[in-house]
Amino acid sequence: MPRLPALTLFWRFFFGLLVAALIPLLATWYFARNVTTDNAERLAEARLRYEAAQIAWRADGWLRLNFESLSEHADTIAMRSMLPELQRPVLIAIATHQPWTQLAFTVSPDGMSLARSDSLAPINYADRPYFKTAMSGQPLGQIIAISRTTNRPAWIFGVPIKDEQGKVAGVLAKTNGLNELTDQLANTRIGDTGRAILLFPDGKLAGMTGAVFDKDLRDWSKHPLFVERENARGGKLSYKAEDGRATIAVLQPIRFGWLVAVQMDEAEVLQPVADTDRLMGVLLLVSTLLAATFAAIFAPGLSRPLVRLTTIADDMSRGHFDHEIPGTDRRDEIGALSRAIERMTRSLRLAMERLTKTEGA
């Protein structure tokens, strides 16, 4: 196996300086990267949690307001009477008092609308899930759909109307535009990639930052955000988005099964780590260049005298003792070596002169 050539003083000096510089630098990089990663993740999570809490607080309050208001009206004498002439003024007042209300109506047990806040003819609601749920005695039945009036998501929900014996006599329902919630989501800005999302209990997308709704609602029931919501640890979830990007999200459940989520690309979360890596990479390059520069400057100062002394010693081995020894005035190891060679030269010259005289006698 061939032997590798020995390293010259330049390369030994260079690698020595490089190792001396890189060991503390790499250690600093390691600890700085870990600290930066932890801080970046904690900061991003705190920001996402804050945004999610703000949106959830507002959405939860809006849902509660509408539900409690409709439940209170369902418990009035006018509603219990199940008489259209008594119910219609109340329905008009509900629609007028809450500007996001598109329609308020009552439904009789057979599924036909009884009274409405508009002037449309009766409609059969017997197959509507929210009607069936409320008629079964559940406190709330709900669906989400695109409103035919606004072409935007609307929350349609109903509560049971019960008579004095507690028997369900009909359903009081309302159609609400979700502008109060979706406009807030649309105006939420979380960094460059952050988005706020509002999901209905069945996974339908009710609103999202930057979302444009057409005739149909987007179904997110198979989206990782919805599928893995039960596995979120402390409300935090990491998953791969549809485009393959790693994403971090914070989930905040609210009443009636709705879900608020705020997410951000992991690359943006870890941007400070990438900045740290770039900075440390530059420092590594600078350290390498400085080590090479110092080696180029100082190595010749060591190698040239040694090469000169080696040449003199080689000539001495061939019987030439007339060299002037350089560096004898230096106060370092090379100066000591030069003086030692100078003494050895005098000793060898004297010995050779004595040998010559002896042979001549």
Image: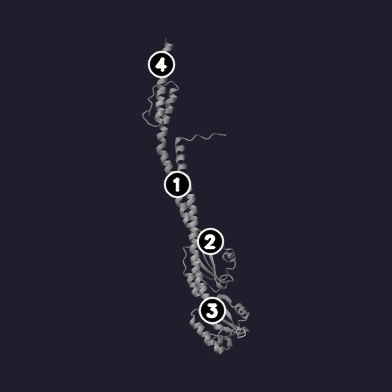
Q: Quadrant of the N terminus?
A: top right
Tell me if label 2 and label 4 are in contact, CB under 8 Å. Answer: no
**Secondary-structure class at tag 1:** helix
User: Dot 4: few (<14), some (14–19), or many (≥20) neighbours within 10 Å?
Assistant: few
Q: Which residue is mark 1?
A: 285
Real-space Cα distance between discs 3 and 2?
37 Å
Real-space Cα distance between discs 2 and 4?
89 Å
Q: Which residue is mark 3?
A: 68
Tell me if label 4 and label 3 are in contact, CB under 8 Å. Answer: no
Q: Nearer the viewer, residue 349 or 20?
A: 20
Q: Amino acid at mark 1?
A: Leu
Real-space Cα distance between discs 4 and 3?
123 Å
Q: Mark 3 or 2 closer to N-term?
A: 3
Real-space Cα distance between discs 1 and 2?
32 Å
- Horizontal side of 5 relative to 333 (left or right) equals right
Judged from this view, the residue extending furthest toward the bottom is 85
- Horizontal side of 228 relative to 290 (left or right) equals right
Q: Which residue is mark 4?
A: 353
Q: Quadrant of the C terminus?
A: top left
Q: Nearer the viewer, residue 143 or 236?
A: 236
In the rendered image, which quarter is residue 67 located in? bottom right
In the rendered image, which quarter is residue 142 located in? bottom right
Tell me if label 1 and label 3 are in contact, CB under 8 Å. Answer: no
Real-space Cα distance between discs 4 and 1?
59 Å
What x and y, as percent, mark residue 114?
58, 86
Tell me what residue is drawn at x 53 percent, y 61 percent.
247
Q: Mark 4 or 1 closer to N-term?
A: 1
Tell me if label 3 and label 2 are in contact, CB under 8 Å. Answer: no
